[in-house]
Amino acid sequence: MMVGDLPYKELARRLAGAGLRLRTGPVVSRIRSRLPAVVHGVALHYANHTIEDEDGFADFRVGVVVPPSLRRWVKPQVLFEFDGALPFLPLPAPQAFAMLEWGLNWCVSNHCHQYLIVHSAAVEKSGRALLLPGPPGSGKSTLCAGLISRGWRLLSDELALLDLASGSVVPLTRPVSLKNASIDAIRRFAPEALLGPPVHDTVKGSVAHMKPPTESAHRANETARPRWIALPRFERGAAARLERLSKAQAFMQLADNAFNYDVHGRRGFELLADVVTRSDCFAFRYGSLEDAVPVFDAIARQP
Amino acid sequence: MSTPPAHLIGLALGNPQALADLSLPQWEALVCHARRANLLPRIAVALDDLGLLYEVPAAPRAHLVAARTLAHAQADAVRREVAHIDRALAASGVPVVLLKGAAYLLADMPAARGRMFSDIDILVPRAALPEVEAKLMLNGWAAIKTTAYDQRYYRQWMHELPPLRHIRRQTVLDVHHAILPTTARLKPDSAKLLADSRRLLGEPRLRILAPHDIVLHSATHLFCNEDVGNSLRDLVDLDSLLRDFAQKGDFWPRLSSRAAELDLTRPLYYALRYAVRILDTPVPARVQSAAEMGRPPAALRGLMDTLFMQTLQPERAAEWLASLARGSLYLRAHWLRMPPLLLACHLLVKTFRREQATAH
């Protein structure tokens, strides 16, 4: 069953009760929340995601809750709950859905050491994956949102999960997090994209999430082999320019952006070496999505 | 569905064979609670020793294997870090005693298997602190807490230097001169601990405490520390240490007399009581009765039973009750660390500083 198959009231009831068992790629999260912003966000962004059975296994038990204090009446705050503990400081209530998304990222990057996890967007075309590694602010989410609006399949916006045995990217299909000027850039570039309501004054500025394309959500169990690595860098007014990057530089960039490279030791080294060996590696500068997307469409047409 | 998760953790550690019958929702509960207690890799190791890890259903197994991978990486990091510390202090000739996790690991004790590590703790003679601190700073360790109040708090009242962090590796090191704060009610004599410490096998300079003292330090840490979140993990350490040392013939008879020498009969009493009750640790009856010398008055014991059983088996309690118990133990730990007036001043400063921090 999909989230979209549930009537809104039933979805709210499950989120308020024992929790909604939401599957995103290999991860099942049991999510609890009574906050309307969370119910709304889940209904919008995860409509095409699978709900798992009650008698199955959830990887993470999470919740977004209002702390029991008098503040709930003045400037309400919300907390992220994980395994019954509270790993983060509270955030203002309007950021409830963003907090769920950040919390879920944290769950995966801190615990799923069956993968080598790279801070990277990942998209796919004809079975081949393009990795866009980079720290926040590099423009990877914007480029990712642009590409998936033009036929690329979304594997992940934040966390590229590399399978240790095969080196393939395991999809973790979740909403794309757009910040500040990127929100309007995507609205202009892809008016049909579904964006949630922007929330302002977060640590990252204004944030709006973009719903994953339906096909990407449905194909969340199909892995893809890395074929291209491009280090994105957004620069206002710059023309799109793709430059070769040496394998060694690409390796260091992946390792620098990995969350758990140190956990895997030699195995992690060999995996990344393998990934860069069979990928074309680039540095990519761009100033507009209109210029940027055709560049990747062109390399995807090559055999 | 009906087995409470607290029993699941006990079952997983004591009788891993029994996990074969768990349903997926029970696995979910076990993974969730064991992860929170930092015991997931420990359970993975227990299953693997019996060749049962690959019988576990794939979804929970992924967490067990991932946690074990993380614990291995942490153990490697601790070994490397200890080598750095040893090298930094080599020229000083100061005896460096490894404490807790690092000691278990470097001495190859079963307690280190599948254990998660965070900071490294060492013990040195108080007189050597200035030299040790200077050598460490020359080699890249710097104080994390730099306010005048924090510096004074540690240097005047605590049993350790302000925590140090290495500027490149970001690892945290606690340099102790005692195992309890200078201001604490109990006064274990560090000179006795150092005198009885022994050389670590295969290491020219590094030392560890004597077996009795390792157990007593672990008990002290468990029952006088405000870090209540790791209580069950600490109790598992203690269980593992006791089972290991029990195989040496002369271990049990001297345990409670050593506790008396070090002013630690109360922590030993609690440690043995809860290890036996919660983890079925095989403590001989005569050792339990010898430990009775540390027994608290009946009313206090009743209260402590309630508090410790709540925190050590949090899954059994309602969340508010467990949280109340954790809060009470946090206060108790502070109460044991400082005389009342000093404690009141310290808590006042902490509250005031928190207000300031949130106001900014």
Image (cartoon, rainbow, N blue to C red):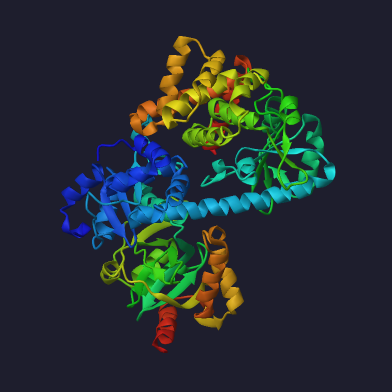
Q: Is residue B179 visible?
A: yes
Task: Give percent across and percent down for residue A126.
Answer: 35, 81
Please provide percent x and percent y for residue B253.
Answer: 60, 23
Front residue (pair B162, B5) = B5
Please tell me how many numbered marks the rendered image carries: 0
- Height in image: B240 above or below A113? above
Q: Residue furthest bottom?
A: A303
Decide: is A164 above or below B89.
below
Please give left or right for residue A161 compared with residue B157 in the image: left
Report the side of B196 relative to B112 (left or right): right
Compared with A184, B254 (above or below) is above
- The N terminus of chain B sits in image quarter: top left
Quadrant for the C terminus of chain B in the image: top right
Residue at (69, 48) in percent of width and height? B82
Front residue of B131/A201: it is B131
Indicate the quadrant where residue A22 lies: bottom left
Q: Percent from the top left, x then y, of residue B325?
A: 43, 25
* Residue depicted at x 43% and y 16%: B303
Please state if A123 lies on the left or on the right of B112 as rendered: left
Q: Which quarter of the figure has residue B152?
A: top right
Q: Position of residue A18 (x, y in %)?
A: 25, 43
Q: Is residue B127 above or below residue A153?
A: above
Residue displayed at 50% across by 75% down: A275
